[in-house]
Amino acid sequence: MKIDPQKPADLSAQIAQAIRDAIVSGQLIVDERLPSEAELAEQFQVSRPTVREALKRLAAQSLIRTQRGATGGAFVNRLSFEDAYSQQITTSTLLLSMNAVRFDTACEARYALERACAPLSATRRTADQLATMRAEIFRQAQPGLTDEAFCASDVAFHRALVDGADNPVLSYQLAGAVEAMQPLMNMITFTARSREAIIAYHTKIADALEAKDAETVDFALVELETYTRQLAQDVAERKRKPA
Amino acid sequence: MKIDPQKPADLSAQIAQAIRDAIVSGQLIVDERLPSEAELAEQFQVSRPTVREALKRLAAQSLIRTQRGATGGAFVNRLSFEDAYSQQITTSTLLLSMNAVRFDTACEARYALERACAPLSATRRTADQLATMRAEIFRQAQPGLTDEAFCASDVAFHRALVDGADNPVLSYQLAGAVEAMQPLMNMITFTARSREAIIAYHTKIADALEAKDAETVDFALVELETYTRQLAQDVAERKRKPA
DNA sequence: AGACTTTTAAATGTCAGACAAATAAAATCT
DNA sequence: AGATTTTATTTGTCTGACATTTAAAAGTCT
């Protein structure tokens, strides 16, 4: 891990990469303490600020955590699913907004992934997750709900569906896909009638999950996808011809 | 974005979060230049090293890029799919290795997601992607191939399948799931017979994709998943009773 | 002796000021 | 006009210092 040729790029980036490699390859294990900043500076033959910049890079990825005080230092962090979620959501959101991904593309991806969860969810969903879905459906039916609140509730509903698969890896992967769609969905204005339609689909999904009927869940998801894409298309067309 | 109460945590983390929020919310747009480090230091009433640590955090997430020289500075980066891939692979790999996710869980997630791509891939795969899959199958049949090389080729094969869906969002989401599995797969020793079996499944998948037969692709993937999980189970049992 | 308080040492967090290197625009020269 | 040199700006790095936090060691009192 000591390797550090002084030729090409930023020293702090090189040092960060060296430590990152050591973590990923397992040379540094969880909760192990890194040498102090002064020691690392000596080891890499750089100054302490440079080492610190490298450590901050790693901290930004939740690969290490730092602690002050006598027994403090930088420790290899056990990456939690929660940390991974939030990073993924940030990344996915930016990816979608910065690359001008078409609504259809994002929508297709989201529902393809969600349908992958559905059969598992139909088998494993807990009563608790079912209750969450019912509660969100109830919330969505409230009059006077803003469009944004409606979307947030929609995300919570689908999140419960995904978590029903009882597979943390799947939940992690899908958190990005579902939540990153929210800003795009927020561009849609939901009329009372369209809300009613969406709630009907949600109810159908919840009912089918309760009955552990995977096929019906899948069918309802396809319908919901079609309907959502139609809504977005209408909005786009109305924008083109505003009068 | 100027807000910065000096109460709780590290200043550099706060500053990074403030700038990150400005980017995510769209206040700072792609390719826009941030104020110079000296100006930021003045603006936030901190020293330049503190600002630099904050910027390094953002650089670690590929949110900004820096450039030296007269017209240099820190610029809001257009997050590329490629950057997002590599970040996701690092995160997923660590998540799997650090949290001792069971092989079955990861495997289930991977194949669930891959099956989500399959119908799209059956419709849209290009001749080029098909050729890649054939080439990887050919490589997998070479005698004297190490287990690691076999796994790497396996990843490349499945990667081509996923890319066949022609949906960058899906490709991005699945890159992590597929590639992060590789270290786990590397723990399996592939006998000549098991390689033969896997190659047979791969061939079946490629044939079905060529024929645009989504149903057969799905069926073959299920078979491959079952077989892979059986292999892993055998390895685990042999470890328990080594004699 | 045991419990409490004080001191001390080690570590990260922050600051100030300086110089090096890169880079493009401005100024200068041929 | 074109090529060259100068200059200014900005990031990258270094040195040295002080502040803050924290736990262990030392000391004190009952």
Image (tube, coloured by chain):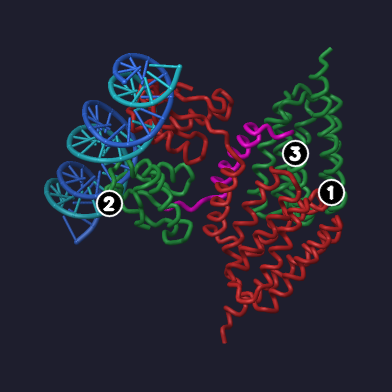
Chain colours: A green, B red, C blue, D cyan
Chain label for disc 2: A
Image height check: is B194 above or below B176? below
Residue located at (26% from left, 50% from top): A42
Mark pair 3, 2: CA separation: 49 Å
Vertical side of B1 occupied by B65: above or below:
below
Whether labels 1 and 2 belong to a single chain: the reply is yes
Q: Is residue A195 visible?
A: no
Q: Main secondary structure of the magenta part?
A: helix
How far, Cα to Cα, is label 3 from label 1?
Answer: 19 Å
Q: Earlier in the sequence, mark 3 or mark 1?
A: 3
Mark 3 neighbour class, 10 Å CA radius: few under 14, some 14 to 19, many 20 or more: some
| Residue type at tag 1 | Asp
Q: Which portion, as a residue range, is magenta?
A: A76-102
- Whether label 3 touches label 1, CB < 8 Å: no
SS for callout 1: helix
Residue D6 place in picture, x, y as percent: 28, 21
Secondary-structure class at tag 2 = helix
Residue under numbered circle 1: A218
Residue name at image x 63 percent, y 68 percent = B150
Q: Nearer the viewer, residue A51 or A69?
A: A51
* Callouts 3 and 2 in the same chain: yes
Image check: B216 left or right of B56?
right
Which of A106/D4 is in front? Answer: D4
In the picture of the structure, the residue carrying the numbered disc 2 is A39
